[in-house]
Amino acid sequence: QVQLVESGGGLVQPGGSLRLSCAVSGNIRSIYLMGWYRQAPGKQRELVAYITSGGNTNYTGSVKGRFTISRDNAKNTAYLQMNSLKPEDTAVYLCNYNDYTWSQWGQGTQVTVSS
């Protein structure tokens, strides 16, 4: 089994920044994707960004240039640096581990962007 623990959410004003962390533990394979998703009230869960074991990244269009995903393989931790936050970024953010045989979700962390 794999466990994920997210942290770093909170309340921030528009234009502000937050950094989310996702620590992975348990039966971790050497090659796995880490992804950040978000789900706003009444909306479907959407992929925000993902990063491969080799460091290749992909972002959804609305966050390009504002969000940066990274990972520390030695610490089995993924990060999402979020800058220039907008009210429409408000959502529960969830990280996901996927080693192509198993997918595991974290419990999520609330991000609220409001003045």
Image (cartoon, helix red, strand yellow):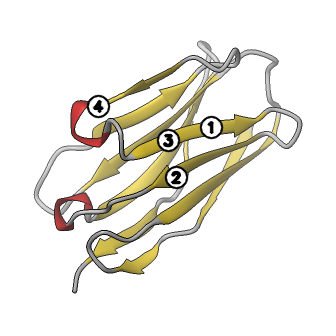
Image vertical order of residue 54 relative to residue 13, above or below: above
Which circle marks residue 68 in the picture?
3
Locate residue 83: give its quadrant. bottom left
**Residue at figure coordinates x 31%, y 74% from the top left:** 112
Which circle marks residue 60 in the picture?
4
Image vertical order of residue 65 relative to residue 40, above or below: above
For this view, does 21 lie left or right of residue 84?
A: right
> Are discs 1 and 3 less than 8 Å apart at CB?
yes
Q: Where is residue 33? Give x, y as percent.
A: 60, 23
- The local crowd at label 3, few if under 14, some if 14 to 19, many if 20 or more residues have their Cα within 10 Å, is some
| Between discs 1 and 4, the one toward the N terminus | 4
Q: Which residue is mark 2?
A: 81
- The local crowd at label 4, few if under 14, some if 14 to 19, many if 20 or more residues have their Cα within 10 Å, is few
| Between discs 2 and 1, the one toward the N terminus | 1
Of the 4 image quadrants, the one containing the N terminus is top right
Dot 4 lies on which element? loop
For this view, does 11 lie left or right of residue 104?
A: left
- The local crowd at label 1, few if under 14, some if 14 to 19, many if 20 or more residues have their Cα within 10 Å, is many
**Residue at figure coordinates x 44%, y 55% from the top left:** 82
Q: Where is residue 54? Give x, y as percent.
A: 69, 14
The amino acid beneath tag 3 is Thr
For this view, does 110 lie left or right of residue 56?
A: left
Q: Where is residue 64? Give x, y as percent.
A: 32, 35
The amino acid beneath tag 4 is Thr
Marks 2 and 4, how far apart at CA = 14 Å
> Are discs 2 and 3 less than 8 Å apart at CB?
yes
Q: Where is residue 17? Give x, y as percent.
A: 44, 66
> Are discs 4 and 3 less than 8 Å apart at CB?
no
| Between discs 2 and 3, the one toward the N terminus | 3
